[in-house]
Image (cartoon, grey):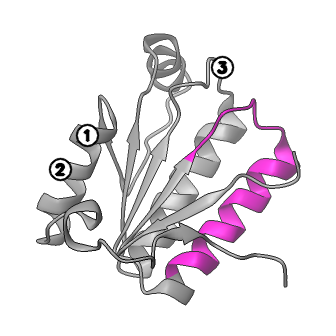
Amino acid sequence: MDRIPILRMGRYLLVTIQVDLYDRLALDLESDLVKAVSANNSTGILIDISAVSIVDSFMGRIIGNIGTMASLLGAETVVVGMQPAVAITLVELGLDLKGVSTALNVEKGMALLDSKTGGASASHQNTNTDDDEIDRSE
């Protein structure tokens, strides 16, 4: 897999990580997300990591970096679907995910984004064909 798909849902970006992230893929995701926030004036990022069973300090740092960078651009970051083993590992590594909120699942994550951005979720407000995958072919 060359890139992790980034989907735009109105004002939010949705990323579902379905594979173990190796370092280059994680760095590309970080860069692609920050560019997508800026290009789409996104106010929120929702990252689903429910398929991720292992994280290391590098991955934890990447997630924290995404949250910090998105915050600087005016967007909130919510990570959903974290498995207990991943949460335990992040705490044991002493990683503080600054700028990143967490929720149990996508539904609760969207509600959290709505509460943080003061808006209705993208799925409720945007029923046209604006929702699509971000083109990063440049």
Q: Secondary structure at mark 2?
A: helix
| Picture coordinates of residue 77, whole percent (x, y) | 39, 57
Q: Earlier in the sequence, mark 3 or mark 2?
A: 3
The amino acid at mark 3 is Ile
Q: For the magenta stretch, what is the residue range?
A: 16-37
The amino acid at mark 2 is Ala
Q: Tell me the chief SS of the magenta region.
A: helix
Q: CA distance from mark 1 to mark 2?
A: 6 Å
Q: Quadrant of residue 27?
A: bottom right
The amino acid at mark 1 is Glu
Quickly name the residue at label 2.
Answer: 111
Q: Is residue 51 above or below residue 6?
A: above
Q: Is residue 130 above or below residue 49?
A: below
Tell me whether circle 3 and circle 2 mark residues in contact (CB < 8 Å).
Answer: no
Tell me whether circle 1 and circle 2 mark residues in contact (CB < 8 Å).
Answer: yes
Quickly name the residue at label 1.
Answer: 107
